[in-house]
Each structure stands twice: as C-alpha cells, then as structure tokens.
Image (cartoon, rainbow, N blue to C red):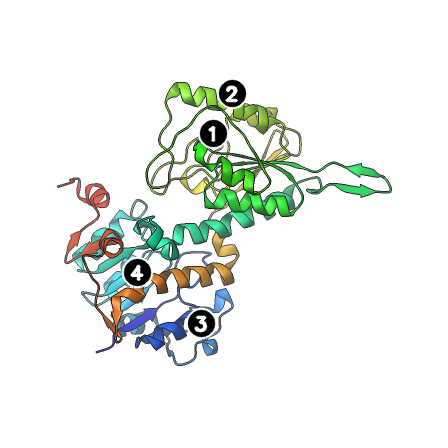
C-alpha cells in the first residue's frame, strides 16, 4: 500500500521555508507516493495551495498527522506535533538534537522513526542530499548582500567625475560552503576579498574565486569536512596574523560553525574596537554563540562605531530557492527508500543507516543517546 507523505506548516517563529515545493511534489507523486499538505504550508515560501497539483489539502496539522505515515519537516517536530503522530510514523528533517533533546526523547517514546538530515554522511555519493551545504550556500550569498547593504561605502571600484573610488576590502572567515559563497558574491559585487580558513586545503578554492587567501601558518585539517580544535599556541599565531587583516577590513563575514557545538571565538572585542569606523561584521555563526565576542544573536548592534549583526536562520530569508534546494535534497535522500510507493529502506545502506536518529523506541545516534540518556552504551 502506498505511503502517505505529509507536509505540515512549520511552527518555528519566522520560518518561511517549506519542506516540499510543487515541482518536487510531482516527482514524489510519480514514485507512487500519496501526498497530504496542510493548507498554507507553502504560502510563506510563495507556493500557494493551488500550485500543488494532485495533492490532498487538509486544514489542520492534527488531520495531516492522522493521515500521514511519512512526514517532511524543515525543523524537528514540536512535542505537540509528536503527540499527534501515529506510532511508527517516519519523520525526516533537520532534527537539531543538541537544541531539542526533549523532542528526541519524545520521538523515542512514541516509537517514531526519525531521520536527521544533518547526519547524512558527507561522502561523494550523498552530496545531492547534503542539506547543510545547500542551506549554507543560501546563507553565504545572503551574508554578502547584508554586508553590502550595511556598509557605508561602495563595494566596487568606481570611476566618477569626482574621482576614482577604491573598492571595499572584505574579509571572509571560514571557507566552507557558506564562506565560499560569500566570497563569490562579494567578488561579484566588485569588492577586494580575502578569505581565511584554518584548513590550508581551502586555499585553492578561495583563490579560484578571485580572492586572496590569508595564510597564518596554522593548519587544522579535521574529519568530516570540519576543522579540528586548535592548540593555544596555534590560536595565538592564528590571531596575530588574522587580526591585522580584520582591522583593515571594511566588512567582515564570519562563517566558522560546527553543528551542535559552540562557535569558535575568532574576533576579540579589542579587535572590533580597532576596526575602521563604519566597518561591518556579519556573524553567520551567531546561533552557536558567534565568532565575534560582541555578537548578540538575532540582533544588530553598534560597538565603537562598528556594526555587528548576528542574523539567525538566514536561509529562510530566501525562501523560494532555499525551499527548492532543501526539497530536492529530501527527494534524493528518500527516492532509494521508496519502491512502488511503499517505504522500504535498505538498512545496510550507509547513507540511510547513519542518518537515523530514533528507531524502534531507541535513540540510535550515539552522541544524541549520550546527551539524552547520559550513556553511550
């Protein structure tokens, strides 16, 4: 019997994305899946109900959960949502277990099979499913626009009747997906861009975008595409070199974040106080406490005539394409598990098995199990 896939409205305040866009809903329908959409689920992403052809529309979340065996979410379901689900329901989304351990415990107790998209292994075969990368690309692009919008100067060099205006100097800290997209966008806007990352392997990527790589002499290659923790000596050396570039910048964009862990503090208060009057810092790591010591999550402040902005949930500010990319990630992830409309996961598949958060009344992911239950056994 074909599985029913439910797409509810997101309950997180300010969230404008939707987990399923009409074009991808059509692709799921062709796989034999029956789709149920809560009325208005896509409206904040500019996808009205009537754009979802062949999809059943229901008025309430309770009605949707009663009819759905598979639920697609952007964020983890709230406790009330979990209560409305049938036992054994499959839920797929970004579960953020470190932020919502109580929701994980509730999914365990309700015997919900949950897949955390942020746990998808970062291997070549799974690149098309990587929601962290797709959403980081949106955030990096938007961060460059935020910096340009708040800057007191032009980004590009301009030759005018009043003379030549030099281009802005932009420093991007962190050369992951968000950082590289920020570099590319700032370059398109005409700025002179420098990029920095503790992983020396990113030099080639930074330079391929037309930016200059800031070499501090410190390398911190880590596993899983993330940087390792630096020693105190390495941090000191990193700071001394990097800070010279930061104080000379017109705009700084920081992107150094590791899911589930505090963001590394890279920009000291004293450095902010040495920056140019009117300089701008966009701290994309604000959710984890920020890369800058003066960052206040979700707020824009002015510290000694330097604008410091720590935006939250940046991808939601571009809901059309952010939703489209996320939706395609889900399609690529779930397609191998759907056969003639039925949900049939291959538990021997590394991508599927490693992405499970809860299953059969247990927390499968070891780090989350230790967080919630206090044991790694």
Identify the image quadrant of residue 165: top right
Instruction: Report, in whole angstroms, how far the alpha carbon at label 4 lies from the one at label 1.
Output: 34 Å
Q: Which mark is residue 92?
A: 4
Q: How many marks?
A: 4
Where residue 84 sits in the image (x, y, percent)?
A: 25, 66
Instruction: Tell me the CA gap for discs 3 and 4.
Output: 19 Å
- SS type, badge 1: loop
Q: How crowded is mark 2: few (under 14 residues within 10 Å), some or many (20 or more)?
A: few
Could you tell me which quadrant the C terminus lies in? Answer: top left
Q: Which of 331 and 318 is in front in this view?
A: 331
Give the label, 1 or 2, closer to the camera. Answer: 2
Q: Residue 350 carries which label?
A: none
For disc 2, the marked residue is 240
In this figure, which residue is indicated by the disc labeled 3? Answer: 23
- The image shows residue 134 at horizontal and vertical percentages of 44, 54
Q: Name the residue under label 1.
A: 266
Disc 3/disc 2 C-alpha distance (Å): 50 Å
């Amino acid at each position: 019997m074909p599985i029913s896939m439910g797409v509810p409205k997101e309950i997180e305040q300010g969230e404008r994305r939707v987990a399923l866009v009409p074009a991808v809903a059509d692709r799921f329908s062709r796989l034999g899946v029956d789709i149920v959409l809560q009325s208005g689920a896509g409206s904040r992403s500019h996808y009205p109900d009537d754009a979802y052809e062949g999809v059943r529309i229901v008025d309430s979340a309770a009605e949707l959960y009663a009819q759905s065996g598979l639920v697609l979410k952007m964020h983890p379901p709230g406790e009330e949502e979990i209560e409305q689900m049938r036992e054994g329901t499959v839920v797929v989304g970004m579960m953020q277990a470190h932020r919502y351990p109580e929701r994980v415990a509730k999914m365990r107790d309700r015997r919900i099979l949950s897949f955390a998209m942020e746990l998808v292994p970062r291997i070549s075969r799974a690149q098309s499913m990587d929601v962290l990368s797709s959403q980081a690309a949106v955030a990096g692009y938007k961060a460059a626009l935020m910096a340009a919008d708040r800057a007191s100067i032009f980004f590009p060099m301009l030759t005018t009747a009043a003379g030549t205006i030099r281009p802005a100097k932009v420093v991007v800290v962190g050369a992951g997906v968000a950082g590289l997209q920020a570099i590319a966008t700032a370059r398109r806007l005409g700025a002179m861009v420098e990029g920095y990352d503790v992983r020396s392997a990113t030099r080639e990527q930074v330079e391929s975008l037309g930016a200059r790589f800031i070499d501090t002499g410190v390398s911190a290659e880590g596993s899983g595409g993330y940087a390792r923790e630096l020693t105190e000596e390495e941090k000191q050396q990193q700071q001394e070199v990097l800070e010279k570039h930061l104080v000379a910048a017109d705009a700084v964009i920081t992107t150094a974040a590791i899911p589930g862990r505090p963001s590394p503090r890279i920009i000291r208060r004293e450095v902010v106080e040495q920056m140019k009057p009117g300089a701008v810092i966009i701290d994309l790591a604000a959710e984890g406490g920020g890369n800058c010591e003066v960052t206040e999550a979700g707020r824009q402040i002015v510290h000694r005539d330097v604008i410091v902005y720590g935006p939250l949930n940046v991808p939601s500010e571009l809901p059309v394409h952010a939703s489209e990319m996320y939706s395609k990630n889900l399609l690529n992830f779930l397609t191998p598990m759907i056969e003639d409309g039925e949900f049939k996961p291959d538990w021997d598949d590394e991508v599927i098995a490693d992405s499970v958060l809860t299953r059969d009344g247990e927390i499968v992911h070891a780090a989350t199990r230790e967080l919630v239950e206090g044991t790694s056994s």
